[in-house]
Amino acid sequence: MEDIRERKNRFWAFFVLGFFVLVSVTTFAYNEYYIYLSIYLWFGLVYGLALQYGRFCFSSAFRDLFAVGVARMAVGITIAIVLFAFVASLVTAQGLSTFHPAPSGIHAVIAGFIFGAGMVFAGGCASGSLYKTGEGNMNALIVVISISVAQALFVDVGGWTNNLVPEAWHHSAVAKGLPESINVGDGWMDQYLAGYVWDHPVMTFSTMLGWENSSALGAIVGNFLIGVLLPSALLLAVVYFVWSRKAFVRKRVKVGKEKMTPLDEVKGYWAMLTASKRTAIAGLIIGVAAGLHMLVLQGTRVKFGVKNAGALLERMGFDYGISVNGTVFDPGYWYVTTQEAQWVGWMLQKSTGANYMDNVFFGYVNGIPNPAVNPADWMSIATIGGAAIMALLYSEFKFKKPTLELATWAIIGGTLMGLGARLGLGCNIGAFFIRVANGDPSGWLFGIGMVPGAYVAVKFFNWWTERKMAKQGFDL
Amino acid sequence: MTMKFEKITDGNFLLDVKGYVCPHPQIYTKKALERIESGDVLQVIFDNPSSGESISTMCDNTGDEIIEKKKEEGAFIWDIQKL
């Protein structure tokens, strides 16, 4: 029985893999520019494989510390950030980085708070929900849909929300002189972006220290050592002393070793780093892959003589949904939420006829190209596929129907994540992981916001769980 | 699907959280372990793979021992003895 199930699982795993091979081969045979789409696709697949293998979820990193005192994921993510930062610093020092820092300000902390609360409610972060969808978890699919819809609606919201826009934002937004097709003076998000966020400083640790960002000194010492390695080591030390040390000491006491020397503390710190091999291995793969992703995409851009996939789409005759600047969403690295907002933006414009290209997010920057030819879309689809392959091979794929209770949390959490992602110009990947690893202080600000957001949501779930257990007669 | 937490026999409890996703299985397990006595055994049934990693590390931290791990049709069945 088990054999038949395993054989079936293997068949479906290779079927999914075969589908992606077919997409890559047939599109490349049609036009070599599709290699750009395939690069996103195959890196997305690697992310999906690694995320599922390591059960790699940013929500877990923040939530499990407060909920069950488990530091496993916080450690794994920090390992991934440090490794990615190291590879990224080498790529940056070669002048081949695709990374652009974001404006730094208090808005990143507020956005992180909303996103942090949302990911705990939803049961997974933006990337975590993709890999869990690949495991057959339909609750996670509801989260993905909620994030996508919330973003697409939020970036285009106008009407009464204009009354909530400070006058200074309005004047600043209008003064930017954006093209006429972008109605920047109408809509809360447009005026928030062009009239408030864009007025904040854009920097990296290297530029803050007065060094050239793409110099070896700036990229390796400024961005990597000072911006990532030192704060990460300190953060892990805090995690060790607050959450992990107690267990290490208890195990030593059990074998008759009560005194802790400084060397023992180092051993305890190392034991924490290597406690979950799956998580550490996933962190290593994700860190290195994210760095290579930047390098490969930049090399491809140079080969084709473009700076954005929008130019390639236009060369291939696709002009629908390209932004007024001739661009589409093409971050050049791992990203999750924007391409999902594009799916919904494209569908809404196609089905309702309403204009979703008159706002800054879609019309000025990211566009809403057909999802079938949108390179970044394939990164998300392949992340789901990669996770499905891994789950099938380990017999962990299980189709799970959502219940009313879990679907409610998924919609609330997904919506909060969607709002937080747009306010912070990215999710746990784009606004936190990628930015922190590339020496952008706004990434740390987003992370600082996620901590209290996750804490508040965990407190809520603690109360909710106590209430349900009390109903079954197990009140403390 | 609803969470089930019940006493099976003296010293043996069952927590069935199949169908639940993160963070519910690990929070329910923590709360259930708080409600039983030292030496009691809690059988946890869950089908959310990532919760297993959290429950396993949580037990490692607290000293509670996972005395048996089984896997049946995509569900994990773990027996945890409270320290």
Image: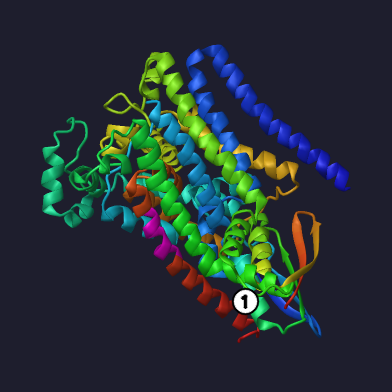
Within the image, what quadrant is residue A101 found in?
top left
Whether residue A121 can be seen here? no
Instruction: Compare residues A103 and A128 and report the one nearer the observer.
Output: A103
A79 vs A431, left or right, is right
On the question of residue A87 being in view, the answer is yes
Q: Residue at x 20, y 48 (%)?
A: A196
Q: Magenta stretch: residue B83 in it?
A: no
Q: Position of residue A158 (x, y in %)?
A: 24, 48
Residue A360 percent across, percent down from the top left: 26, 38
Question: Mark 1 belongs to which subunit?
Answer: B
Q: In screen coordinates, is A270 left or right of A201?
A: right
Task: Identify the secondary structure beneath mark 1.
Answer: helix
**A10, A250: nearer the viewer:** A250
Apparent side of residue A326 relative to residue A413 in the rendered image (left or right): left
- For badge 1, the amino acid type reads Lys
Residue named by callout 1: B31
Q: Is residue A128 above or below residue A449?
A: above
Quarter of the image for residue A381 reads top right
Query: Which residue appears at 40% of the width and 65% of the height?
Result: A452
Q: Residue at x 75, y 54 (%)?
A: B74
Point out residue A14 in the picture as x, y percentages from the top left corner.
Answer: 72, 32
Magenta part of the chain: A446-454
